[in-house]
Image: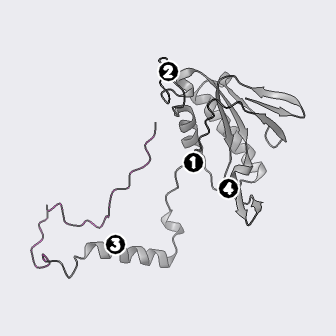
Amino acid sequence: SSSLVGGEQISSIGRGLCVLLGISLEDTQRELEHMVRKILNLRVFEDESGKHWSKSVMDKQYEVLCVSQFTLQCILKGNKPDYHMAMPTEQAESFYNNFLEQLRKAYKPELIKDGKFGAYMQVHIQNDGPVTIELESPAAAVDPKQLTKLEKQQQRKEKTRTKVPSESSRERNAPRNKDDPSASSGAEGDVSSEREP
């Protein structure tokens, strides 16, 4: 893969990953760290015996070429692309440079290459396969402070509902055993976080 600006080649790599990074208005350090881990640990290469989907770019000591790509944040309004969800240029450049810095710290600086931020680039990618994988950071947990009064009231109602046994229950008159595993704690289930590599 290689990136060209004005016909001049500014970056190129051999075997490895070409990362097109679309930075969202809502992205934070948390999303950045998640993406760095995923990119470096994603098993998309074969092992020594030829078994596919076994090795990461770090396992193989391959290179990574990063290109900032705001158009990945496209939202279609009818047939017209809209990019209001992309992070503004000044903020995005700082985020992009931080992303590159974290990749270099977590891997090997000399194996991380980048395009020219904000420039009109021609990116030449020779796909091996071809294989294209879309990665997204997990949705952030909602900050309780951001909930409206109505949402809080709704939450309280739902919590109360889970604690009250149904009137149609045959066991409504049976004494509740403190250690009874079937007793509702008010939680509908355990929400597990995404498994990290």
Residue beneath label 4, please?
Answer: 25
Residue at image coords 68%, 49%: 23
Specify few, some or many for label 2: CA neighbours under 10 Å numbering under 14, 14-19, or 20 or more.
few
Percent position of residue 32, x then y: 60, 43
Report the span colored magenta: 170-197
Residue beneath label 3, please?
Answer: 159
Classify mark 3: helix, strand or loop: helix
The alpha-carbon separation of the residues under discs 2 and 4 comes to 41 Å
Residue beneath label 1, please?
Answer: 136
* Circle 1 or circle 3, nearest the eye: 1
The alpha-carbon separation of the residues under discs 1 and 3 comes to 31 Å
* Most distant residue in the bottom direction: 167
The answer to whether 69 is drawn above or below residue 167 in the figure is: above
The answer to whether 112 is drawn above or below residue 151 in the figure is: above
Q: Is residue 170 left or right of residue 28?
A: left
Q: Amino acid at mark 4?
A: Leu
For marks 1 and 3, the one nearer the N-term is 1
Q: Amino acid at mark 3?
A: Lys
Classify mark 1: helix, strand or loop: loop
Asked if the stretch drawn in magenta spans residue 20, the answer is no
